[in-house]
């Protein structure tokens, strides 16, 4: 290996990767190892690659990604807890030619916002929903979420989720796939390079569908980790996710071009 | 001139629409009007009533307890509103289904057999127009031509062919109103 | 002269939304205001002006659709009745916090809880003292006629965009359900997307390359930032208090006693004034048009003029009366009268209360 100087490395002709201009220079507020940063980045890369920034409006939720507008360098609105699909509906109905997406966690989308999510999906709003599912309430300190899997520990299920006592986890993505108003429904992950590539392809498709006015919601779930909330190291959290979350929330497309594929 | 009126009967008798036509007629002759219905579950099959005010001046309260005139079309309404006519005021009623006729002696009382006359004309739906005719004979607060104008303005065009029938019904009511008790 | 129609208050409100150039109405049915969305759906405003009308899955969703569309610079309206308005309070607090313009109407019915569908004015505190959480205010317009149900939609939008806050049209079951003559104002054209971008640089319509991104939010995690934001809001409310007070003084010039009322109670009280004057009593009506801002200064002027007593007439157990007391600062006697829970007081009852509580009391 030859020694190359720093000046050599940063020469434009040696550039191998560049952060998208649609991410700000603000330091991410997410914990090291969290999937949010990657999910933000690939969503913004797609907006840039498709050259949609001048007509795109994003909706940030309540939850860890409440400050998504500090990082996504596009016009953004911050919605009340769970109401992002209604906010997106409001914008899309008065601007049918713009690109509107929500970015929501599982507490936001699958608990308090269940009605807004299901009805926006069922009406067939021409919007994109990016749904980060880490099976826990991250922002408030690791409480049980509607997506917390059976036996999984959280601060409000300290002995593991007891189905008899606490009810069943909600597979929101499978649920919305069965509604006539969804056009594309898929479940992805961002914990390995190959998973990121697949997730990015799915997000691309979700925005292309909206751009091309395909009828209905394009819904991308990303199963992600929460090493802080799960009280694990990032690598252990990813391993635990593969072994426990993926069997319960299997990755892959569920509905493509309006047809169920699973 | 201010006329404060209540029309009361069963839901389905055309009580509300009669009030509406009267109000529209008032607008046609450049008067102030208000139309305040009873609303809610009682409208569905039960009693219905509407307060109509026609005035040359700005109208104050659209809700009243004492009226210049009461048009009463069923027994429940008779029991409720006979006492609400101001002394010297007017009560007009259809005797159909009435078991206790009005008893007051300090008001003018008229009868109109609206249900029978409408049925004889072959259309029970014009019942309310027969009653309106009787009222306008007793108290011509709006001109017949303005009632017709009001009908034209308030009815969708597809119903305009029914306007002559409504006019006949008003005339029938005007001819057949009966004096029951008239103050000197 | 505009087009003359006989309309229900709720219908006039809906027609006025179309004519005011609204871009969208998002709503949910509830008695006694369902005629608003029924009228809009029947009118096909999409064909008339391009206005969008959508029946949401709940009042909560409807107010958040308002948030989204208002945040993108559009002229949007919703309406409901008391229980539905309670559901909207979260969204309204966010709208006030994010400084978004919108108009909404509350056709008040009796409460608390599911209450009754009959008219009431018991949402005064909710309307004028906040409603949702946090230190915010909204402009509250109180129509007392079908004409004002129409006119206040146009005025409401002007004020909402001038100050960037929610404007509430506080109506009730009487004003919503009754029909009166209404002169409709001419169609105001809807703004084009280009006009919106020029007029409202804060609106999130998509970030143009080479410009800064716009963010609509009510969040500031740092307390001192939130305090600064609150100070900015308070300064705005002060301007509103100084410039937007509206009321109507009827027979107040020589009055010894004043009835203070708004909405349908003001109509009833107007009849009481007529009855009182016939009895030789010098009674006037101070009809509030804006409930926030409250015309405190002008009420104090009446005190200086020699008014001996004020009777607050409202269909509640006594809410507005507190603001009357604060306004007159003990310079004259103040009492409250009102039926509530859906019962509407009569002009005779009001006169009786005036004689008992103020004149004789």
Image: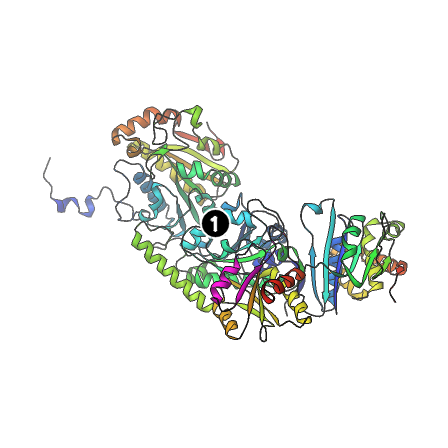
**Residue sitting at x 48%, y 46%:** A89
Query: What span is colored magenta in the figure?
Result: C316-342
**Residue sitting at x 42%, y 40%:** A129
Q: Is residue C302 above or below residue C268?
A: below
- Using a 10 Å C-alpha cutoff, classify the residue at mark 1 as few (fewer than 14 neighbours), some (14 to 19) or many (20 or more): some
Question: Total of numbered circles in the picture?
Answer: 1
Res B22 visible: yes
Query: How far across and down, in percent of the image, does residue A90 sit?
Result: 48, 49
Query: How far across and down, in percent of the image, does residue C201 sit?
Result: 39, 60
- State left or right for residue A153 relative to residue B141: left
Res C20 visible: no
- In the image, residue C320 lies in the stretch drawn in magenta: yes
Between residue A39 and residue C360, name the one nearer to us. Answer: C360
- State left or right for residue C279 relative to residue A204: right
Quarter of the image for residue C209 reads bottom left
Q: Is residue A59 above or below residue C235?
A: above
Residue named by callout 1: C89
Quarter the N terminus of chain C occupies: bottom right
- In the image, residue A22 lies in the stretch drawn in magenta: no
Q: Chain of mark 1?
A: C
Query: How far across and down, in percent of the image, does residue A25 sit?
Result: 26, 49
Quarter of the image for residue C253 reads bottom right
State the residue lying farthest toward the left.
A3
Query: How far across and down, in percent of the image, does residue C106 sit?
Result: 55, 54
Between residue B73 and residue A137, name the one nearer to us. Answer: B73
Quarter the C terminus of chain C occupies: bottom right
Q: Which structural element holds mark 1? A: helix
């Amino acid at each position: 290996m030859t020694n190359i100087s720093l000046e050599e490395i940063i020469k434009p002709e040696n550039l191998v990767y560049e952060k998208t201009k649609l991410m700000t220079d603000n330091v991410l507020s997410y914990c090291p190892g969290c999937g949010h940063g990657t999910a933000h980045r690939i969503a913004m890369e797609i907006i840039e690659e498709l050259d949609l920034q001048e007509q795109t409006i994003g909706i940030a939720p309540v939850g860890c990604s409440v400050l998504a507008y500090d990082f996504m360098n596009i016009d953004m609105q911050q919605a009340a807890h769970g109401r992002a699909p209604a906010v997106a509906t409001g914008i899309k109905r008065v601007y049918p030619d713009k690109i509107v997406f929500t970015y929501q966690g599982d507490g936001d989308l699958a608990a308090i916002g269940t009605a807004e999510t299901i009805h926006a999906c069922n009406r067939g709003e021409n919007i994109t929903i990016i749904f980060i599912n880490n099976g826990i309430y991250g922002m408030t300190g690791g409480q049980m979420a509607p997506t917390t899997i059976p036996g999984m520990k959280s601060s409000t299920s300290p002995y593991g989720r007891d189905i008899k006592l606490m009810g069943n986890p909600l597979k929101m993505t499978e649920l919305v796939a069965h509604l006539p108003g969804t056009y594309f429904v898929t479940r992805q992950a961002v914990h390995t390079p190959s998973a990121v590539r697949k997730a990015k392809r799915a997000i691309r498709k979700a925005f292309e569908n909206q751009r091309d006015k395909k009828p209905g919601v394009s819904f991308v779930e990303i199963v992600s980790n929460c090493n802080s909330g799960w009280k694990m190291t990032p690598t252990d959290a990813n391993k635990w996710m593969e072994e426990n979350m993926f069997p319960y929330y299997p990755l892959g497309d569920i509905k493509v071009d309006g047809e169920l594929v699973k | 001139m201010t006329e404060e009126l209540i029309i009361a009967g069963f839901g389905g008798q055309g009580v509300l629409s009669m009030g509406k036509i009267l109000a529209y007629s008032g607008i046609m002759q450049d008067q102030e009007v208000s139309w305040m219905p009873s609303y809610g579950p009682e409208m569905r099959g039960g009693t219905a009533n509407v307060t109509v005010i026609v005035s040359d001046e700005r109208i104050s309260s659209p809700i009243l307890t004492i009226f210049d005139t009461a048009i009463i079309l069923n027994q429940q309404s008779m029991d409720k509103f006979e006492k609400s006519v101001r002394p010297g005021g007017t009560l007009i009623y259809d005797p159909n289904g009435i078991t206790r006729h009005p008893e007051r002696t300090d008001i003018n009382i008229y009868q109109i057999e609206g249900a029978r006359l409408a049925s004889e004309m072959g259309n029970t739906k014009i019942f309310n127009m027969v009653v309106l005719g009787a009222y306008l004979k007793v108290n011509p607060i709006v001109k017949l031509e303005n009632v017709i104008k009001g009908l034209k303005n308030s009815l969708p065009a597809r119903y305009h062919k029914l306007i002559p029938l409504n006019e006949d019904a008003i005339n029938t009511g005007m001819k057949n109103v009966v004096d029951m008790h008239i103050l000197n | 002269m505009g087009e003359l129609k006989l309309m229900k208050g709720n219908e006039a409100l809906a027609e006025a939304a179309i004519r005011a150039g609204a871009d969208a109405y998002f709503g949910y049915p509830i008695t006694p205001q369902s005629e608003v969305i029924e009228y809009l759906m029947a009118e096909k405003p999409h064909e008339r002006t391009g206005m969008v009308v959508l029946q949401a899955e709940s009042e909560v969703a409807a107010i958040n659709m308002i948030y989204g569309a208002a945040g993108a610079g559009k002229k949007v309206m919703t309406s409901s009745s008391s229980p539905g308005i309670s559901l909207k309070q979260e969204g309204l607090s966010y709208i006030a916090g994010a400084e978004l313009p919108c108009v909404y109407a509350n056709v008040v019915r009796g409460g608390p809880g599911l209450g009754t569908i009959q008219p009431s004015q018991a949402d005064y505190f909710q309307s004028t003292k906040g409603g949702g959480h946090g230190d915010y205010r909204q402009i509250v317009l109180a129509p007392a006629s079908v004409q004002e149900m129409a006119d206040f939609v146009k005025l409401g939008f002007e004020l909402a965009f001038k100050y960037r806050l929610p404007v509430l049209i506080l109506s009730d079951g009487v004003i919503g359900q009754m029909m009166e003559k209404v002169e409709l104002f001419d169609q105001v054209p809807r703004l084009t997307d280009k006009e919106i971008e020029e007029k409202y640089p804060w609106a999130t319509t998509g970030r143009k390359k080479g410009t800064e991104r716009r963010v609509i939010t009510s969040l500031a995690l740092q307390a001192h930032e939130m305090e600064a934001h609150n100070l900015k809001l308070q300064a705005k409310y002060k301007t509103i208090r100084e410039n937007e007070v509206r009321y109507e003084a009827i027979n107040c010039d020589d009055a010894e006693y004043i009835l203070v009322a708004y909405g349908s109670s003001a109509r009833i009280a107007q009849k009481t004034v007529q009855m009182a004057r016939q009895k030789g009593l010098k009674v006037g009506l101070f009809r509030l048009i804006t409930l926030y801002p409250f015309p405190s200064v002008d009420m104090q002027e009446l005190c200086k003029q020699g008014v001996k007593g004020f009777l607050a007439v409202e269909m509640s157990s006594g809410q507005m009366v507190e603001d009357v007391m604060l306004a007159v600062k003990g310079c004259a006697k103040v009492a409250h009268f009102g039926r509530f829970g859906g019962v509407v007081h009569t002009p005779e009852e009001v006169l009786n209360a005036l004689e008992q509580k103020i004149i004789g009391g």
